[in-house]
Image (cartoon, rainbow, N blue to C red):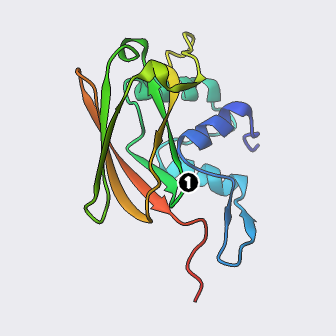
Amino acid sequence: TALPLSREVHQLLELHGIMGSFIDCHGQEQEITYSNRLAVLALMGVELTANSDVEAVLKDYRGRAQGHWLPAAVVVACDKALPLNLTLPDHHLDASFSWTLQTEAGTSHAGSFDPRKLTELSPPDPRTGTGSVRQLDLPPLPAGYHRLTLESPASSREVLLIAAPARGYQP
């Protein structure tokens, strides 16, 4: 039997950046089948079967992601405001952070922020050990591959930002 689409499966797909649809070069929304999304998830190392304890898989993923403020790569819309969701444990909320954004063209942007002053999208979850999710707003980026470095006094993280247009090129 197939694994039903539950809230937890949807969260796993979303956490891995696997969306349910895309806009093709003709401006038409194309649905991605649930089975294909599960196949992509399996290629990313998360194989789910009808007997899978999806809640345990999700908890394990969140546990491994703990301490990682962002995934290794994030796909964003180019030329639009760039809200990034940071997952920060409580001990990072009182730190001062700085960020540096290096664009593919070599342009550099920098800034700093206090995590407690960022919009809180979701509070910490003691059941899963997930930290507070806060929104960091960055400047719009042109299409391309860019590097964001976040630094606190205790550590730093780097993330690849892939800025993509909403639609593919039409000749």
In-image side of 105 versus 48 (left or right): left
Badge 1 crowding class, 10 Å Cα cut-off, few under 14, some 14 to 19, many 20 or more, is some
- The x and y percentages for residue 135 are 52, 33
- Secondary structure of the residue carrying tag 1 is helix
Can residue 109 be seen here? The reply is yes
Return the x and y of residue 169 as percentages of the image width and height: 55, 79
Is residue 53 something that shows in the picture?
Answer: no
As drawn, which residue projects farthest toward the bottom? 171
Question: To which quarter of the image does residue 24 belong?
Answer: bottom right
**Nearer to the camera, 142 or 38:** 142
Task: Name the side, left or right, on which 124 lies relative to 1.
Answer: left
| Residue 152 picture location, percent across and down | 27, 25
Towards the viewer: 161 or 128: 161
Residue under label 1: 40
Q: In this view, does 94 lie above or below 53?
A: above
46, above or below 119, in the image: below
